[in-house]
């Protein structure tokens, strides 16, 4: 592999530095780094971040290759600045055996755009009846450490307790989709005045909060780790905040769309805005931003959920839940958090690289992610131009799907280049 010299990059938004990469590793960092045989990239004005890590991605393969494949999804990830993604288990067949998670892991290695860390199902077939092969998936070549039935909630308290007890033995984590099913039967959007006016069945905040509270207490009782997926309400934030004040083993994520979009967008019945959990109120959005800024919410995770055209180009009631997220995540975070002064770029590195890698246990081993930009560390890097503005065009997406909620919206920042162990997996026309 040819050496690469990145000149004048603002590492984590700081002063310009040169980054010299050789054989997939950062070998020099500072000013005036040089090497005659290196390919030179002028990064003047660009910010260097550690490669982003997504703890919550739907790649759809196997079984729903009409919506996304591992190849197309990881290409979209690279374009968004991600070097590793955790692929959720709700495929067909479900990733509830060692064989299926190893298939997904190998597809990621073959594609080569970003490392794929499979998430194993908690229960067989996501049915919430019997535990899946958690130990076998953990011992497989994929080395699964995160387990989730995302898309449905592990609503049985006894089963959730058993799952937490099981994964404790190998330092695993259960990532919970917090949704009390009896409180959300037929629900279509956030419960409130607007849902009543639109004639759509409401999705109450307490349906999320009840499961968050229960699982925090179960994790405390077992002494095992629980991670709360796509937190969306003020009440959930307060529960997680109290849990952390008590030192309980709980972490939480927020999606880019829950940091930016509100339920007011549903007024036009546009299925692009139909998502699980639903878009919430402006007050919820403000609480989520504050919680991400102060560390109550640990990470940003995309919940990238591609769907074929026919699943979204239909009436609201029949439309599938979910939005694309990988290619726009960093721009949305810049818009909602950085440009508002709530986070600096070092904070973005923590919430979108260091912390998700640590929670997902992919910050060590042979091919670690979420590591600092430092000499001797793997050259997983993202170069960002924060000064640009781009109008979101779904037809330009690397994803096979087009269900972005940001179509036509102007978002700040551009991922100029992404490096996976020193190899450029994405570049724009503006960089050599």
Image (tube, rainbow, N blue to C red):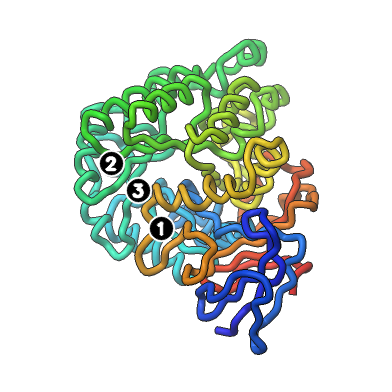
| 429 over 290 or under it: above or below | below
Q: Which of the 4 image quadrants contains residue 175? A: top left
Element at label 2: loop
Q: Considering only vertical position in the picture, is 277 above or below 34?
A: above
Quarter of the figure that contains the N terminus: bottom right
Which callout, 2 or 3, points at the residue further toward the start of the chain?
A: 2
Quarter of the image where one finds residue 188: top right
In the picture, the disc for residue 146 is 3
Choose the circle earlier in sequence order: 2 or 1.
2
Residue 9, compared with residue 201, is above or below; it is below
Q: Which secondary structure, mark 1? A: loop
Residue contact between numbered discs 3 and 1, judged by CB atoms under 8 Å: no
Asked whether, in this view, residue 191 is left or right of residue 355, the answer is: right
Residue 13 position by quadrant: bottom right
Nearest the viewer among 395 and 257 is: 257
**Residue 323, percent from left and from top:** 59, 41
Mark 2 lies on residue: 123
């Amino acid at each position: 592999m040819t050496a690469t010299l990145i000149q004048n990059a603002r590492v984590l938004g700081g002063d310009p530095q040169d980054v010299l990469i050789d054989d997939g590793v950062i070998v020099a960092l500072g000013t005036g780094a040089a090497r005659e045989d290196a390919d030179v990239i002028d990064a003047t004005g660009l910010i260097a971040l550690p490669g982003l890590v997504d703890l919550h991605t739907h790649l759809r393969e196997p079984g729903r290759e009409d919506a996304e494949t591992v190849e197309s999804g990881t290409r979209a990830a690279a374009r968004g600045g991600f070097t590793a993604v955790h692929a959720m288990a709700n495929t067909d067949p479900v990733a509830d055996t060692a064989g299926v998670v190893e298939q997904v892991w190998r597809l990621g290695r073959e594609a080569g755009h970003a490392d794929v860390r499979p998430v194993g199902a908690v229960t067989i077939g996501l049915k919430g009846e019997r535990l899946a092969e958690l130990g076998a998936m953990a011992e497989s070549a994929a080395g699964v450490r995160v387990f989730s039935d995302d898309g449905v909630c592990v609503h049985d308290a006894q089963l959730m307790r058993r799952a937490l007890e099981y994964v404790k033995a190998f330092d695993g984590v259960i990532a919970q989709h917090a949704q009390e099913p009896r409180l959300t039967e037929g629900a279509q959007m956030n419960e409130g005045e607007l849902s009543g006016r639109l004639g759509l069945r409401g999705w109450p905040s307490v349906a999320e909060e009840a499961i968050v509270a229960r699982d925090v207490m179960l994790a405390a009782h077992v002494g095992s780790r629980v991670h709360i997926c796509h937190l969306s309400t003020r009440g959930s934030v307060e529960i997680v905040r109290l849990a952390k004040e008590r030192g309980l083993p709980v972490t939480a994520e927020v999606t880019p769309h829950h940091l930016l979009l509100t339920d007011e967008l549903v007024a036009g019945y546009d299925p692009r805005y139909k998502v699980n959990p639903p878009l919430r109120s402006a007050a919820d959005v403000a609480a989520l931003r504050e919680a991400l800024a102060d560390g109550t919410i640990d990470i940003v995770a995309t919940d990238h959920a591609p769907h074929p055209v026919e699943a979204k180009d239909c009436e609201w009631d029949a439309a599938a839940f979910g939005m694309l997220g990988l290619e726009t995540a960093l721009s949305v975070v810049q818009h909602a958090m950085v440009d508002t002064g709530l986070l600096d770029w070092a904070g973005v590195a923590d919430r979108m690289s260091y912390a998700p890698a640590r929670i997902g246990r992919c910050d060590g081993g042979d091919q670690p992610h979420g590591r600092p930009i430092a000499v001797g560390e793997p050259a997983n890097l993202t170069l960002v131009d924060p000064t640009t503005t781009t109008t979101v065009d779904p037809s330009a997406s690397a994803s096979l799907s087009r269900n972005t909620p940001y179509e036509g919206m102007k978002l700040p920042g551009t991922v100029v280049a992404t490096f996976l162990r020193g190899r450029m997996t994405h570049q724009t026309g503006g960089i050599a």
